[in-house]
Amino acid sequence: MGQERKSVIVWKKICQMATSSTSRFGLSSASIPSEKKTSISSSDVLRLKKPAKGFLCKNKLTNPVQFVEFKIRDMKSNNVFFEVGRPVESLEWHQTKGYDHEDVSRTITYEFPKEILSYESVGTSLVFAVEPNRALNSFRMIEMHYFKDKLIKSFDFSFGFCIPGSVNTWENVYKLPKLDAKSIKEMVDSPLKTVSDSYYFVDDKLVMHNKAYYSYY
């Protein structure tokens, strides 16, 4: 399968995540409150030691944000090694209430060249749209990366206030952990054992939770 075709499939999955829903680590994943709790906060998520077992919020059919473009680049060379997108004009905002009981729409698998494991830092550019009739007072993402259930790195980014109907660009820089040759080889030889949980909060309430699995070649 060609790289362009792969990107199309990956982007469809990312869009589904955004539209079909989305040391300090003192507790195990089993200790995090279940979906029966009224809402999950950022402090709940920051207690995790391991990848969450399942998803920590329901998969809503509508969400306050939709993803438009996503790009990843090496900060040192400025080389873009992943880029997908869709026209803003293609966005549709449905008022349908309810939940999607299938988790496939918020689970994605990436295949990246193994060279990125040696990068010092990568930059991401995420373009997202806010639904027309709702302002976001605080939009925050917490992302945690694990290898074989061990936390490698966590990232915590806040965008702040977003006006209704706006299209916004969110630029972030990820400083990557320095990995030795043995660790890199083990990650390359262990496809899908590298996992990330991405948590999206509006006003400190979890509104989307996506999972990603990584393979390197």
Image: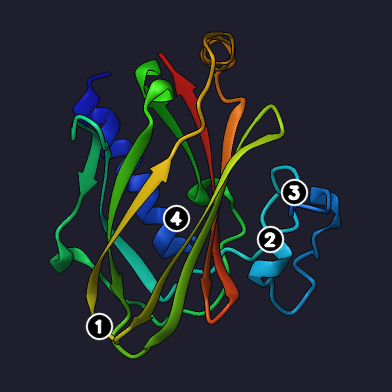
Q: Amino acid at mark 4?
A: Met
In the displayed structure, 102 sits above or below 61; it is above
Counting residues from the start of the chain, the first of labels 3 and 2 encountered is: 3
- Counting residues from the start of the chain, the first of labels 1 and 2 encountered is 2
Q: Look at mark 2 in the image and give the residue it sits on.
A: 45
Report the amino acid beneath label 1.
Answer: Gly
Q: Earlier in the sequence, mark 1 or mark 4?
A: 4
Q: Nearer the viewer, residue 188 or 95?
A: 188
- Quadrant in the picture for residue 74: top left
Distance from disc 3 to disc 4, alpha carbons, whole Å, reads 31 Å
Q: Horizontal and vertical percent for residue 205?
A: 60, 76
Q: Could you classify mark 2 by the number of other residues whose Cα lies within 10 Å: few (under 14), some (14-19), or many (20 or more)? A: many
| Sequence order check, earlier mark of 1 and 3 | 3
- Which residue is identified by label 4? 17
- Upstream in sequence: badge 2 or badge 4: 4
Q: Is residue 78 above or below residue 59?
A: above
Q: Nearer the viewer, mark 3 or mark 4?
A: 3
Q: Secondary structure at mark 1?
A: loop
Which colour assignment does the render follow? rainbow
The residue under label 3 is which amino acid type? Answer: Ser
Residue drawn at x 80%, y 65% is: 33
| Residue ID at (83%, 53%) | 27
Q: Secondary structure at mark 4?
A: helix
Q: Position of residue 142 (x, y in %)?
A: 54, 58
Residue type at numbered disc 2:
Val
Which of the labelled discs sits on residue 23, or is there none?
3
Label 2 or label 4, whichever lies nearer to me, is 2
Could you tell me which quadrant the C terminus lies in? Answer: top left
Q: Is 33 situated left or right of 119 in this image?
A: right
User: Considering only order in the chain, which callout, 4 or 3, is on the residue closer to the N terminus?
Assistant: 4
